Amino acid sequence: MQDVAFTLMQFMRVKQLVYVVALTLSAWVFVFPLPEVSATHENDHRFVVQGHITDSNGRAIPNTKVFVRSEVLETAVTAFSDQAGFYSALLHLHNADAGKAITVNALGNLKELAADFDPEDKDTPRTAVVDIVHVVPVVEKKSGGTDTSRYLTWGLVALVAGVSLGIVTRLWARRRKSQST
């Protein structure tokens, strides 16, 4: 019986030790948080396509989805333009991919370019700038007035009809009352 009690006490001590170690590690993570980790490719595997998206007046178009695709990639890389209309997309291209076609698609505007870089140069960042100008078609106004003016006109007609009906009903009620007395 003493052996069972002794074994149970050892188990409890080990369990307490595990709790103390876990608590210490948790406190350590809160006091000394882990650094933010990000992974990027080396210069010789990284190709960045960047540019601005603007309208025909030169104003930035924010939050625009941009699809960048290389003929060697199976899927397109998606980027979004920021408030200034700037976007940046990182492609994973190898030295053998120099000269391959890259397409950039945003707001229905499709631009094509070649991955232009020197495969022997391992230090210079490999980038291409593709600016997209989205031409917004001009919509001509109809000569019959805008929808707002039509709603306003019909609203006023309904108001006049309602007030007129109220006045006629009131006059009719007064006439019936005067006839009955």
Image (cartoon, rainbow, N blue to C red):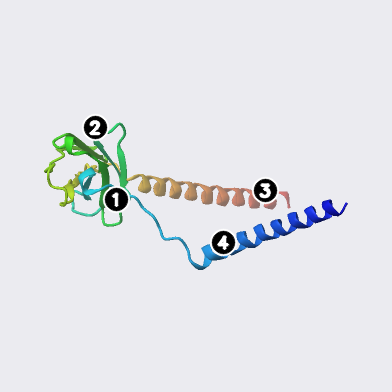
The disc, 1 or 2, on the residue closer to the chain's N-terminal end is 2
Q: Which secondary structure, mark 2?
A: loop
Mark 3 vs mark 4, CA separation in Å: 93 Å
Q: Callout 3: 10 Å neighbours few (<14), some, many (20+)?
A: few
Say which residue label 4 marks: 25
Residue matched to label 2: 72
Q: Which mark is residue 126?
A: none
Residue at screen point 36% across, 48% down: 149
Label 4 – label 2 distance at C-alpha: 45 Å
Q: Which residue corresponds to the image point at 26% horizontal and 49% vertical from the top-left?
A: 88
**Which residue lies under the disc numbered 1?**
81
Q: Which residue is mark 3?
A: 176
Tell me residue 140's x, y (percent).
Answer: 23, 42
State which tag comes first along the sequence, 2 or 3: 2
Residue type, mark 2 in image:
Val
Percent across and percent down for residue 106 are 26, 41
Instruction: Answer with mark 3 or mark 1, whichever residue precedes in sequence.
Output: 1
Mark 2 or mark 3: which is in front? 2
- Mark nearest the camera among 1 and 4 is 4
Q: Position of residue 96 (x, y in %)?
A: 17, 35
Q: Is residue 72 above or below residue 82?
A: above
Vertical relation: 16 (above or below) 112: below
Front residue of 142 and 56: 56
- Residue drawn 59% across the image and 64% down it: 24
